[in-house]
Image: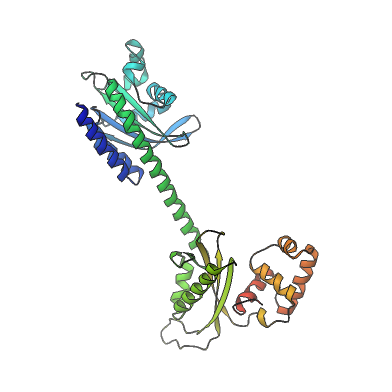
């Protein structure tokens, strides 16, 4: 193969790797392009998972390989492949003709396996991630009628290895992010609380099923939720608070046939939390409540210190955290909360937070 032709084939392989998004794309694009880089009678691409001392193939793609070659190789076990072991030890392509010659090669179980399928020469290219973890391996095999792999073949596969490794590492990270996103979405859909994940600038990332159920049941809720969330996000952008709670009355007419628009005996409350200082992501929780479940905080006879403690409770702080912020003992915090419970006619921290959400837009 002429050097100019190989250089062009390597350029094509590089572009193919850059275009691959998923692991299966990396495998298929490589197998389509590699024959122009190095001639072989069979090509393989394994994506590995390392479990203890054993290499487990997560996926295997081949080109021109005999039908039973992959099952037979998996039965032998990749950890029993001396060519792969040698390639891993030097993190570079290794071929059988230079590692083992004559009877030493013919005595190997791998040789017997390859010979059974009409193959003789073997080259293995290890694929390592940025953390030096084994991600996969490239396999090339030739029949006994073909010459052994040359130093030029090794050099070309060394260059190809770099591009395939980068593409495979990127694809694995991309698929892992997709899996984490899917798991997070599934988990949020199990919540009974209507939830919206967005940027602080208002771009929505995710709305869970509980929110969609609420909006279907209350046809007037959509614009109110949008207005409350937008207002909360605006206040988060202006800072410095990380938690904003606002509420608005809502007509009680539902979506049932013949439902009348009721009086504003319902209240929509939205609590929006900035996930972390300096980050642009926020989560908004939407609550639909009957009015007057408990005494609204803004109309209750609470002292300034009691209102301060109530605000900290609404932010999810523990008694210990509140005591540190207020420079009082935990026992003092508990005494304040007992008085607050009595004044607001609530019996738990959860009911207290609900009373906060039913109050005015701002705690004094």
Residue toward you, 139 or 202: 202
Any part of residue 35 in sight: no
- Is residue 28 shown above or below 92? below
At x 67%, y 78%, the residue is 297
| Image quadrant in which you'd find residue 258 | bottom left
Quadrant assignment, res 107: top left
Residue 14 shown left or right of residue 352 in the figure = left
Q: Residue at x 64, y 69 (%)?
A: 314
How many labels were placed on the picture?
Answer: 0
Q: Quadrant of the N terminus?
A: top left
Q: Is residue 102 left or right of residue 328?
A: left
Residue 117, given in percent of the width and then of the height, sits at: 26, 24
Percent across and percent down for residue 44 are 31, 32
Q: Residue furthest top?
A: 103
Look at 38% across and 28% down and name the residue there: 75
Expressed as whole percent of the image width and height from the top left, the position of residue 292 reads 63, 83
In this rendering, position of residue 330 left or right of residue 229: right
Up-down relation of residue 175 to residue 323 (above or below): above
- For the question of whether residue 161 can be seen, the reply is yes
Location of the C terminus by quadrant is bottom right
| Residue 269 figure quarter | bottom right
Residue 34 against residue 345 in the figure, above or below: above
Asked which colour scheme the image uses, the reply is rainbow
Residue 320 on image: x %, y % = 73, 60
């Amino acid at each position: 193969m002429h050097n100019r032709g190989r250089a062009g084939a390597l350029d094509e392989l590089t572009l193919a790797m850059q275009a691959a998004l998923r692991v299966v794309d990396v495998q298929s694009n490589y197998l389509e392009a590699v024959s122009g880089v190095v001639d072989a009678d069979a090509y393989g691409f394994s994506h590995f998972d390392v479990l203890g001392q054993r290499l487990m193939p997560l996926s295997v793609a081949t080109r021109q390989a005999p039908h039973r070659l992959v099952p037979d190789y998996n039965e032998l076990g990749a950890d029993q492949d001396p060519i792969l072991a040698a390639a891993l030890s030097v993190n570079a392509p290794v071929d059988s003709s230079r590692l083992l010659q004559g009877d030493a090669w013919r005595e190997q179980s791998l040789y017997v396996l390859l010979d059974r399928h009409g193959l003789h020469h073997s080259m293995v290219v290890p694929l390592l991630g940025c953390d030096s973890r084994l991600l996969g391996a490239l396999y090339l095999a030739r029949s006994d009628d073909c010459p052994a792999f040359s130093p030029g073949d090794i050099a070309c596969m060394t260059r190809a290895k770099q591009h395939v490794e980068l593409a495979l590492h990127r694809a694995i990270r991309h698929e892992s992010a997709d899996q984490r996103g899917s798991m997070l979405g599934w988990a949020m859909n199990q919540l009974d609380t209507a939830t919206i994940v967005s940027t602080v600038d208002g771009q929505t990332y995710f709305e869970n099923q509980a929110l969609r159920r609420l909006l279907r049941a209350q046809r007037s809720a959509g614009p109110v939720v949008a207005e409350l969330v937008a207002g909360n996000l605006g206040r988060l952008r202006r800072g410095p608070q990380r938690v904003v709670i606002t509420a608005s009355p809502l007509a009680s007419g539902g979506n049932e046939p013949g439902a009348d628009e009721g009086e504003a005996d319902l209240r929509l409350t939205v609590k929006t939390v900035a996930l972390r200082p300096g980050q642009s992501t926020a989560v908004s929780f939407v609550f639909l409540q009957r009015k007057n479940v408990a005494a609204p905080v803004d109309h209750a006879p609470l002292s300034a210190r009691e209102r301060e403690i109530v605000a900290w409770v609404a932010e999810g702080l523990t008694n210990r955290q509140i005591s540190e912020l207020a420079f009082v003992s935990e026992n003092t915090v508990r005494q304040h909360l007992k008085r607050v419970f009595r004044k607001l006619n609530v019996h738990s921290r959860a009911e207290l937070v609900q009373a906060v959400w039913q109050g005015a837009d701002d705690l004094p």
